Image (spheres, rainbow, N blue to C red):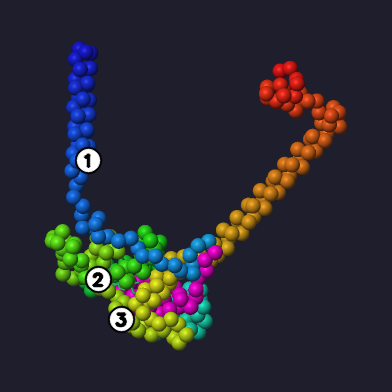
Amino acid sequence: MRYILGLVGAVFSVVLLISFFSNVSTYWSSPPPKTAEEEFHLHPKHLSLASDGPLGKFDKQQLQRGFQVYKEVCSACHSLSQVAFHNLEGLGYTEAEIKAIANQWPTEVPSVNPETGEPATRKALPSDRFPAPYANDTAARAANNNALPPDLSLMTKARHGGAAYVYSLLTGYRNQPAELLKEFPAAKTPQGLHYNPYFANLNLAMPPPLTSEGQVVYAPGNPKPTVDQMAKDVAAFLVWTAEPNLPNRHATGIAVAVFLLFATVLARLAFLNIRNQKKATLVRETGVLEPENQAKSKRAKRKAGIDG
Ligand code: HEC
């Protein structure tokens, strides 16, 4: 009986092995065809910002421009639920300016009429978070071809490539390449979507938000508001919304590194101090160290002429 069971097990294993190797060899000899996404998706373009690197600090002038782009363009569809108006202090706005920004925000904050108890809205206050442009996800989808414009507060943390991805996406719209259509006729951009090779599946529901130079008018003394510049500025702004304390984190990191270096030197000095004291005591108590106390290995002993 045992032999039969063993035989059945062996046959079973052999069949498994054969099927495994035959599948591997088929995969090797004729790999699955590439998809349009695999062939035409692009990695984010290079973007360098003042906040990059361990010594990076925010360029407040750029963050203010980026906020202006968010306010005048993106806020029509995207919420920024993690940021409150008073946080704009971090961009260098004064209290009075923040009050005015909140007061003039196009969407009001949901509230309750104190007299009737009915739902109502009121003007935003500096303590409010940025009001969402749509009442709820259903309304947001209804206005956007059934796609949901995501909240942008943490977007540069949520996507691979961060700010560079946002910048690339905003400047990456183009016509579908002819080679793509020739190779993948079925991958034609559907009605209502827009081709953008920086988006994972190549077609997204967001129409190009930044289309012409001067769409946002920057205050004098700022760079020209080209599409490229506006995209960079709003990407920099979204790095700030995702991590407003970035420069503090950098400063803490450097302080900790310096402290650890200092502590290492101290520890080494303390060790040398104790070792030298021990040595001095030993020499005092036993006279000069005997050679056999110094030569530890066999080879060292032979060299010092001591019998091992
Ligand atoms: C007309 C409405 C509209 C405007 C204006 C708009 N967006 Fe969008 N956005 C959308 C929609 C809808 C999506 C979802 C797209 C999808 O999932 O296909 C989206 C998606 C995104 C995404 C996420 C892409 C991803 O990887 O999932 C980012 C980032 C983004 N928008 C940034 C911006 C920025 C920055 C601005 C302002 C310059 C802006 N959007 C203006 C509607 C808009």
Q: Quarter of the image containing the C terminus?
A: top right
Q: Disc 2 designates what residue?
A: 174
Disc 3 Cβ-to-ligand 1 distance below 8 Å: no
Left-right relation of 23 to 308: left
How many neighbours does mark 1 have within 10 angstroms: few (below 14), some (14-19), or many (20 or more)?
few
Task: Choose the circle earlier in sequence order: 2 or 1.
Answer: 1
How many neighbours does mark 3 have within 10 angstroms: few (below 14), some (14-19), or many (20 or more)?
few
Kind of element beneath mark 1: helix
Q: Quadrant holding ligand 1? A: bottom left
The foreground one among 85 and 93 is 93
Q: Disc 1 designates what residue?
A: 28
- At 36% from the left edge and 75% from the top edge, which residue is drawn? 228
Query: Is 161 inside the magenta-drawn segment?
Result: no
Q: Residue pushed farthest bottom?
A: 220
Q: Is residue 84 visible in the rendered structure shown here?
A: yes
Q: Disc 3 designates what residue?
A: 212
Task: Choose the circle earlier in sequence order: 2 or 3.
Answer: 2
